[in-house]
């Protein structure tokens, strides 16, 4: 899957710049930002480390206690930025390659555990996602008029960095120690999207309102890397406002 997605993105990177030489296409630059909302607990992939952290497990010698952390997936909702270079073929089809950036730090503590002085044991959960995507948009009524709806889909490579940093409790000895665990990598995935483009005084400039949903799953390395589960779900919804310039 990674190889296929990478080959597709590489093909677009090579072919798109050459497209104007072989066909009369319209190029565009699309910049903007919005809000990214990761998937909720009930829809995340099996083995997701954030689900494991949030719900925890009972401690071996004290089953009435757990190692769960205090946070919700809505805490990871945050702003993001994007940039996209596109090519329009005729009035109804566009292809584009783009990059985005999202980052969020969520402070947390254990639900049931405190240190020997009765103080909370605090950590920080940090997630960064940089999607590199290639998408195709279809405009059913074309580029004419003051209201141009569209739908689309594509593939992506999602660069991610997830870390847990702070104080941790050994579930066997109850020793409290400080550490930092980090997982990084690239994950293949896909996107679906829909939106509307509103021309601003002609065909050159435009305002865009777009919703996207992305699908991808990264690897944490599990217990060998210090994490309590093997995966980190990178999926979620984003809602963007953008500015488009055609050339």
Image (cartoon, rainbow, N blue to C red):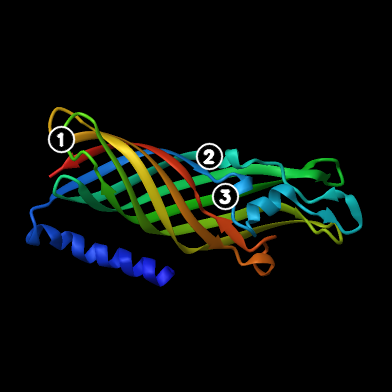
Closer to the chain start, of discs 3 and 2, is: 2
The quarter of the picture where the C terminus appears is top left
- Residue 208, given in percent of the width and then of the height, sits at 29, 35
Dot 1 lies on which element? Answer: loop
Q: Is residue 113 left or right of residue 162?
A: right
Question: Mark 2 — residue?
Answer: 77
Q: Is residue 58 left or right of residue 10?
A: right
Q: Is residue 214 in view from this perspective?
A: yes
- Residue 10, given in percent of the width and then of the height, sits at 29, 67
Q: Residues within 10 Å of mark 3 (few under 14, many from 20)?
A: some
- In front of the other: label 1 or label 2? 1
Q: Is residue 155 left or right of residue 126?
A: left
- x 59%, y 51%: residue: 44
The image shows residue 65, relative to residue 170, as above or below, that is above
- In front of the other: label 3 or label 2? 2
Question: Mark 1 — residue?
Answer: 144
Farthest right residue?
61
Quadrant hosting residue 12? bottom left
The quarter of the picture where the N terminus appears is bottom left
- In front of the other: label 3 or label 1? 1
Q: Is residue 240 left or right of residue 28?
A: right
- Residue 7, given in percent of the width and then of the height, sits at 33, 70
Q: Residues within 10 Å of mark 2 (few under 14, many from 20)?
A: many
Q: Nearer the viewer, residue 13 or 135?
A: 135
Label 3 – label 2 distance at C-alpha: 12 Å
Question: Mark 3 — residue?
Answer: 126
Report if the CB atoms under discs 3 and 2 are less than 8 Å apart.
no
- x 47%, y 62%: residue: 187
Closer to the chain start, of discs 1 and 2, is: 2
Report if the CB atoms under discs 1 and 2 are less than 8 Å apart.
no
Dot 3 lies on which element? Answer: strand
């Amino acid at each position: 899957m990674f190889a296929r997605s990478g080959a597709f993105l590489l093909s677009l990177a090579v072919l798109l710049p050459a497209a104007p030489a072989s066909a009369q296409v319209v190029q565009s630059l699309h910049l903007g930002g919005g809000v990214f909302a990761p998937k909720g607990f009930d829809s995340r992939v099996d083995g997701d480390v954030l689900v494991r952290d949030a719900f925890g497990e009972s401690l071996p010698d004290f089953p009435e206690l757990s190692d769960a952390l205090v946070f919700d997936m809505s805490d990871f909702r945050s702003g993001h930025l994007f940039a996209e270079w596109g090519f329009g073929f005729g009035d109804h089809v566009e292809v584009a390659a783009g990059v985005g950036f999202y980052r969020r730090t969520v402070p947390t503590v254990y639900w049931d555990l405190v240190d020997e002085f009765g103080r909370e044991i605090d950590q920080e959960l940090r997630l960064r996602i940089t999607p590199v995507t290639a998408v195709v948009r279809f405009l059913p009524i074309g580029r004419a008029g003051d209201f141009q709806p569209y739908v689309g889909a594509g593939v992506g490579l999602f660069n991610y960095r997830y870390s847990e940093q702070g104080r941790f409790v050994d579930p066997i000895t109850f020793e409290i120690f400080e550490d930092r665990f980090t997982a990084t990598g690239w994950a293949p995935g896909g996107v679906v999207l829909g939106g509307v483009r509103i021309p601003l005084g002609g065909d050159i400039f435009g305002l865009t309102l777009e919703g996207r949903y992305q699908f991808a799953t990264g690897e944490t390395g599990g217990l060998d890397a210090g994490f309590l589960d093997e995966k980190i779900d990178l999926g979620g919804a984003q809602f963007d406002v953008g500015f488009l310039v055609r050339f």
